[in-house]
Amino acid sequence: MNCPKDLKYTSEHEWVSLDGNTALVGITDYAQDQLGDIVFVELPEEEETIDQGDTFGVVESTKSVSDLYVPLSGKILETNDPLLDNPGILNEDPYGDGWMIKVELSNPDEIKELLEAEAYEQLIKEEGA
Amino acid sequence: MNKTPLNHWHREHGAKMIDFGGWEMPVSYEGILAEHHGVRQACGLFDICHMGEIEIKGAGAWEMIQSLTSNDVRRLADGQAQYSLLMNSDGYAIDDILVYRRSADHVLLCVNAANTEKDLAHLLAHARPDAQIIDLSADTALLALQGPASVDVLRRLGVELNSVPRFHTLDIAVAGVPVLFSRTGYTGEAGCELFFPAAHAVKVWELLLAAGADAHCRPIGLAARDTLRLEMGYVLYGHELSESITPLEAGLEWVIRWDAGDFLGKSHLQAQKQAGLGRQVVGLKLLEKGIPREGMNVVAADQPVGRVLSGTLSPMLQQGIATALIDRAVLSGASEFFVDIRGKMKKAQIIKPPFIQRG
């Protein structure tokens, strides 16, 4: 399973790409593979304030519903609305066109709680076992 | 965990496996959507070996089945099959089943996997000396071949599908294996279901896939089996029909033959029909984006009026579809219905399934 080294991860299978005080958030390659065909996406409103651990959206496969958890607190600057019409992008390009939200961080200290790629790889290995 | 004889094959071919009522079953192989469309456009092969097969033999076999099921077995000739309900004394179906007439003293029942033990116990509780009950489930493989191209696949095996009427059977041989060929299915497509000795499961499965290679025949998991059946509005026991949803509420009066004499639970069903139904299973199509799921509330005029029993995204319609159990009183009154999806009210239309038109 592909886990780019320059990203950070959560145990809930979100990835985070940091750029100064903003972060892009999406779901990992492992997550999209586990879910199978993603057919529905729910995203938050732009400008909304979100807290770490809250749910910010939902992805649904034909069979299952999964909540998405906020990895870092902040304000939503942008949501990737094309996903709403083409949720399959999440399967095809989870780390690229499949980004979900752009967040302006309100508590950058939380970054320390995220996993590095190696730790995340270890986690999915254990989950898959 | 119970395993079908194809368990190893599924694992070797990359299937995602899940626990389905105590059975480890393939939920999908290449992806639910590809599998769903594969069946609608070409054909697919399903491992449904988990389903139960129960034989009843003897001079009293048919009398016994007539008294325990809601349909009329006297309508069956040898080699025919009938959809029916195995009833309890309270007027509920303990299972929906297929009844096969092998001969005048030989019944074959095909029952839901999760209900096999319950059904067997029920049959044994109503056993009679002139009817022998035999559980063949462990020794019987059952595969379903479904989709328009199944006609071509079967022709390669020497069977002309369209020469067999629906709900009729043939005794055939496939690579020397004796097979009961049944023109039945759970997808709304042309196709068949094949019963044969479990020891030959992998051989017959691979032979069918090979015979279907040109027709893009592919293995299909349980997830697509569910979306295919739901698009057709077919009942799934435990969802639209259960020991708390009666056959009348489930819209299955067409499987009840009031004139066929007495059967277990009939008086309760008659009383329910006379009193009138308080609730009813309906089809729902979402008019907005979203996917209704089991347990979600159906809302009319800001009041909950029912709940979703099965729900999915229809791959054909690209819309959310569902079955729901609804208070009957609101059906004539309310004009607008909604499904409460995580607190958001999504507009829905009540329709009579099937959700898609086939054939």
Image: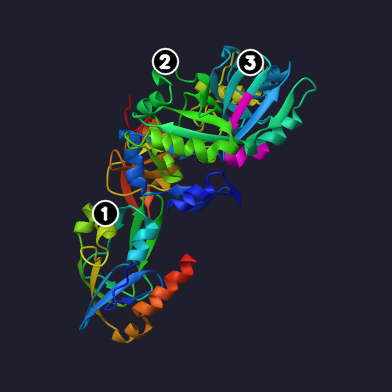
Q: Which residue is mark 1?
A: A88
| Residue occupying image coordinates x 61% and y 13% | B74
| Chain letter for the residue marked with disc 1 in the picture | A
| Residue occupying image coordinates x 33% and y 39% | B38
| Residue occupying image coordinates x 39% and y 23% | B155
Going from N to C along the chain, the mark reached first, 2 or 3, is: 3
Q: Position of residue B107 (x, y in %)?
A: 64, 22
- Find out whether the residues at labels 1 and 2 contact each other: C-beta distance under 8 Å: no
Q: Position of residue B240 (x, y in %)?
A: 50, 37
**Above or below, A49 relative to B44:** below
Q: In the rendered view, does B79 fall on the left or right side of B127?
A: left
Q: Quadrant of residue A123?
A: bottom left
* Alpha carbons under labels 2 and 3: distance apart: 21 Å
Q: Is residue B301 visible?
A: no
| Chain letter for the residue marked with disc 2 in the picture | B
Q: Nearer the viewer, mark 3 or mark 1?
A: 3
- Which quadrant would the C terminus of chain B be assigned to in this image? top left
| Residue farthest along the front direction in this orientation | B176
Q: Residues within 10 Å of mark 2 (few under 14, many from 20)?
A: few
Please, what secondary structure does the residue beneath circle 3 have?
strand
Question: Is B115 a magenta residue?
Answer: yes
Please, what secondary structure does the residue beneath circle 1 have?
loop
**Above or below, B258 relative to A67:** above
| Chain letter for the residue marked with disc 3 in the picture | B
